[in-house]
Amino acid sequence: MQPGQMAYDRGSTVFSPDGRLFQVEYAREAVKKGSTTIGLKYKDGVALIVDRRSSSKLLEPKSTEKIHEIDDYIGCATSGLVADARILVDEARKNAQVHRVNYGENISVEMLVKKVCDYKQNFTQYGGVRPFGTALLVAGTDDLGAHLFETDPSGALVAYKATGIGSGRPAVMEVFEKEFQDDMSFENAMALGLKAMEAAIEDKPKAEAIEIGVAEIGRKFRRLSEEEISALIDKM
């Protein structure tokens, strides 16, 4: 950055001469330092896989929750600043509940994601606030099928068949670009997702250090138990 441009990173509302919002870019860097988080679609469903390895053996692994249930059929995984993610999860849950009360039906996945992204975008457009330093992978099912969306700190959203966020994203995307196939079975999708996670963390995944959430058409969003995760890892 040139010396004359230094002031442009002091406010989230000020564009630099080359059209950049530095605070938003810094928020994206916070996401890149977060836990590796994977999402991939398979036949009739979507899976979320998160690395929740702890930096200390004294830490209770179950206290580091990275996959959250938003409503009966939608869940999300987060990467980046944990406290920021908690606020966005609460906002998503509130929007889902308000929609159900007002219309007597579950909110669609895309509508929910757009509402969360609108909320995130507000924090890039007004003074006195900073962007959220977290990204979400939102997985869910509705009348239109199974969906996987990625949101970033700018408030943008993109639909994916398979993607990753966090520190291990480059390794995850390399595996997916080579091996992902449409309409995979649940078992094949889990094997590919765990393979991508292994490439990202450069170690074999362990059941106690991996969190998996699944959204399947016709079934409620659920998190797999440690025993189920261990069985999937053994099949690798």
Image: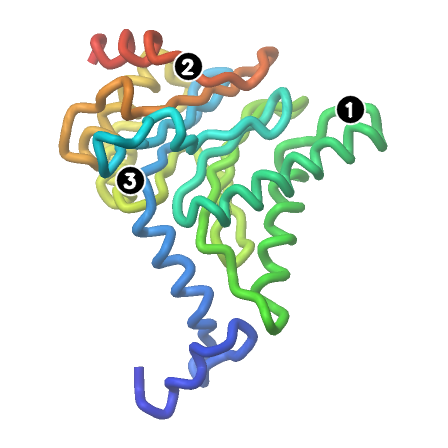
| Count of residue discs | 3
- Spatial separation of the CA atoms under disc 2 and disc 1: 26 Å
- Color encoding of the figure: rainbow
With 127 as the anchor, is 195 left or right in this view? left
Q: Amino acid at mark 3?
A: Met
- Residue shown at the point (16%, 24%) measured from the top left: 204
Choose mark 2 or mark 1, whichever is in front. 2
Query: Within 10 Å of the Cα at label 1, are there few (<14), some (14-19), or many (20+) other Cα atoms?
Result: few
Quadrant position of residue 126? bottom right
Sequence-wise first label, 2 or 1: 1
Q: Quadrant of residue 77?
A: top left
Q: Position of residue 16 (x, y in %)?
A: 45, 81
Q: Is residue 82 left or right of residue 191?
A: right
x 60%, y 59%: residue: 121
Callout 2 crowding tier (Cα within 10 Å): few <14, some 14–19, many ≥20:
some
Q: Residues within 10 Å of mark 3 (few under 14, many from 20)?
A: some
The residue pinned by badge 3 equals 173
Amino acid beneath label 1? Glu
Residue 52: % across, % down: 32, 32
Name the residue beneath numbered marker 1: 105
